[in-house]
């Protein structure tokens, strides 16, 4: 029995989310169908984390235990030949038997893209949130820095019995301006050991209140410290969010095409 890791990218626009559900088109479901067509194995594939409907990924990771003899690069080519165009396996490698795509991960990186230009670019409508009016980027960046470190992020998630522990360590929370297709965009980048449900999107919705002058930086800090969801901003739209990378302890994952 082999343990194989897969590096995934997908456009989440037409998926109900990454995780398999009884109805609708999921990333996990499409991947498992392609795996069965390639290997004739019916397997449950594990993802590093769940992404909501409309959320994209550039660095999602999956793992699967299999008896297939296909080498990693053959797996990449074979799966991509059977997958829909909005889902691709970028790489594959064999990992140790104890590797788990979710439990072995030590950090996740997300990026949220905002378009504050007067007229949005139609080509980016499925991956960028258009926001009308000027934003105070300096105050937004200052608010984001407050999130760095270990905190209770209860104010930035949905209240659910499944989320009993809401303390997370935020490694990085920053704002940068980037250029894409000739347009200037705002990139909000966050990285943490793990994220709560809707956590990034609620952070974005609250930071946008700061950018619009509807919330002060000190009030933003009080939201974090207070832990009350009702004090935070709205949940930002899913389509602006992309899972950029999932990190593991050094040497645990060595992607086939990236080895020297």
Image (cartoon, helix red, strand yellow):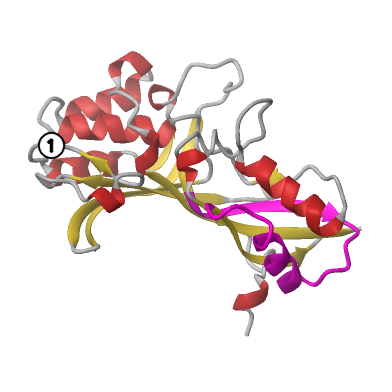
Instruction: Find the magenta span and give its range.
Output: 57-86
Task: Locate residue 1, reporting x and y percent.
Answer: 92, 58
Determine the image quadrant of residue 83: bottom right
Asked whether residue 98 appears in the rendered view, the answer is no
Indicate whether residue 80 is drawn in magenta.
Answer: yes
The mark total stands at 1
Residue drawn 26% across the image and 24% down it: 222
Q: Is residue 17 left or right of residue 175?
A: right
Residue drawn 60% across the image and 77% down it: 258
Q: Is residue 113 left or right of residue 200?
A: left
Mark 1 Cα within 10 Å, few/some/many (few <14, many 20+)?
A: few
Task: Locate residue 172, reporting x and y percent.
Answer: 38, 50
In the figure, 102 relative to 226: above or below? below
Is residue 159 or residue 219 the one in the foreground?
A: 159
Is residue 79 or residue 244 the one in the foreground?
A: 79
Helix, strand or loop status at disc 1 = loop
Residue drawn 64% across the image and 80% down it: 259
Q: Is residue 204 left or right of residue 18?
A: left
Which residue was labeled with disc 1? 132
Determine the image quadrant of residue 136: top left
Indicate the quadrant containing the C terminus: top left, top right, bottom left or bottom right. Answer: bottom right
Q: Is residue 210 left or right of residue 42?
A: left
Is residue 225 or residue 55 the one in the foreground?
A: 55
Asked whether residue 237 appears in the rendered view, the answer is yes
Task: Locate residue 56, reporting x and y percent.
Answer: 46, 46
In the current view of this chain or complex, which residue is farthest to the bottom? 260
Task: Locate residue 246, reporting x and y percent.
Answer: 55, 54
Indicate whether residue 73 is drawn in magenta.
Answer: yes
């Amino acid at each position: 029995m082999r343990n194989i890791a897969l590096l995934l990218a997908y456009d989440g626009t037409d998926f109900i989310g990454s995780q398999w559900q009884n109805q609708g088109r999921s990333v996990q479901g499409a991947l498992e169908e392609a795996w069965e067509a390639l290997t004739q194995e019916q397997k449950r594939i594990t993802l590093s984390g769940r992404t909501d409907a409309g959320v994209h990924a550039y660095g999602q990771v999956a793992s699967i235990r299999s008896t297939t003899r296909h080498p990693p690069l053959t797996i990449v080519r074979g799966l991509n030949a059977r997958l829909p165009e909005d889902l691709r396996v970028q790489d594959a490698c064999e990992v140790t038997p104890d590797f788990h795509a979710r439990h072995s991960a030590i950090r996740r990186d997300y990026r949220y893209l905002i378009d504050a230009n007067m007229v949005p670019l139609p080509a980016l409508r499925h991956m960028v949130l258009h926001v009308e009016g000027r934003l105070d980027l300096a105050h937004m960046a200052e608010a984001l820095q407050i999130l760095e470190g270990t905190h209770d992020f209860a104010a930035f998630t949905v209240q659910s019995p499944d989320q009993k522990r809401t303390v997370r360590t935020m490694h990085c929370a920053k704002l940068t301006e980037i250029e894409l297709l000739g347009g200037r965009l705002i990139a909000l980048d966050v990285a943490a050991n793990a994220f709560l449900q809707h956590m990034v999107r609620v952070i974005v919705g609250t930071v946008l209140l700061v950018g619009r002058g509807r919330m002060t930086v000190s009030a933003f800090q009080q939201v974090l410290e207070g832990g009350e969801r009702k004090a935070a901003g709205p949940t930002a739209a899913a389509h602006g969010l992309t899972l950029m990378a999932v990190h593991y302890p050094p040497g645990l994952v060595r992607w086939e095409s990236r080895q020297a």
